[in-house]
């Protein structure tokens, strides 16, 4: 797996904190910093997610992928899955994640709650590289709601 990240600067000038990542699969991800009113050349323009937001989103995507795949492999009629992530970071550098709460909403027809609970547990204990890695510094909690699409 590889990725190249390039500083974009601000509107052609070599300032600002905008970056574009090109993934090994050829996709682009824009990232930017928060504006800094006191020193604009050190801040971003708020044109894209912060890099740590992208890390959090990646963990959400990784675990949601696992949950859907595990439910589908179990022949469950899964029709939707969202995960809402909230986090806390350390106050001092490095400002690692210290707490991440993941709330899943799974929609499907006749899916037992135990199957959703198992899929989430398997993701966090065995399959989701991102959340397992983040779990080295952050306490990760999970919860879920199950909506029957009768």
Image (cartoon, rainbow, N blue to C red):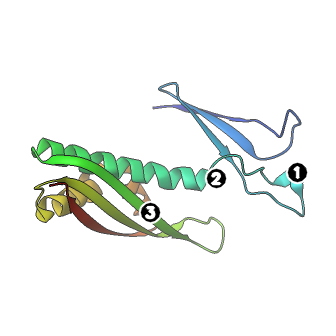
Q: Of marks 3 and 1, which one's residue comes earlier in the chain?
A: 1
Residue shown at 77% from the left, 51% from the top? 44
Quick one: 42 or 147, which is closer to the camera? 147
Q: Quadrant of residue 114?
A: bottom left
Question: Which mark is in front, 3 or 1?
Answer: 3
The residues tagged by marks 3 and 1 sit, at their Cα atoms, a distance apart of: 31 Å
Residue 20, picture quadrant: top right
Mark 1, other Cα within 10 Å: few <14 / some 14–19 / many ≥20: some
* Residue at left offset 22%, top offset 63%: 146
Residue 100 percent coordinates (x, y): 44, 67
Q: Is label 1 in a helix, a strand or a loop?
A: helix
The residues tagged by marks 3 and 2 sit, at their Cα atoms, a distance apart of: 15 Å
Q: For mark 2, what is the residue?
A: 50
Q: Earlier in the sequence, mark 1 or mark 2?
A: 1
Considering depth in this image, is 57 or 130 the residue closer to the camera? 57
* Callout 3 touching callout 1 (CB < 8 Å): no
Q: Which residue corresponds to mark 1?
A: 41
Q: In which quarter of the image is the C terminus?
A: bottom left
Indicate left or right for 108 with 66 as reference. left
Label ID, residue 85: 3
Disc 1 from disc 2: Cα separation: 16 Å
Taking 65 as reference, is 119 above or below it? below
In x, y percent, where is residue 134? 44, 59
| Residue sitting at x 87%, y 62% | 37
- Mark 2, Cα crowd under 10 Å, few <14 / some 14-19 / many 20+, is some
Closest to the observer, 48 or 145: 145
Category of crowding for the residue at label 3, using alpha-carbon neighbours closer than 10 angstroms: few (below 14), some (14–19), many (at least 20):
some
Q: Where is residue 62 in the image (x, y as percent from the top left)?
A: 37, 47
- Secondary structure of the residue carrying tag 3 is strand
């Amino acid at each position: 797996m590889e990725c190249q990240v390039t500083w974009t600067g601000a509107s052609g000038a070599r300032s600002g904190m905008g970056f574009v990542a090109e993934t090994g699969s050829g996709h682009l991800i824009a990232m930017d910093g928060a504006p800094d009113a006191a020193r604009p050349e050190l801040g971003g323009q708020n044109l894209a997610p912060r890099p740590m937001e992208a890390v959090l989103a990646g963990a959400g995507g990784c675990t949601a992928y696992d949950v859907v795949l595990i439910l589908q492999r179990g022949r469950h009629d899964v029709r939707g899955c969202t995960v809402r992530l909230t986090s806390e970071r350390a106050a001092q550098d490095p400002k690692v994640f210290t707490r991440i709460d993941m709330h899943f909403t799974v929609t499907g027809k006749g899916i037992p709650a135990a199957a959703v609970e198992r899929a989430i547990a398997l993701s966090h204990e065995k399959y989701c590289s991102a959340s397992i890695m983040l779990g080295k510094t952050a306490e990760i909690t999970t919860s879920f709601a199950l909506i029957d699409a009768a």
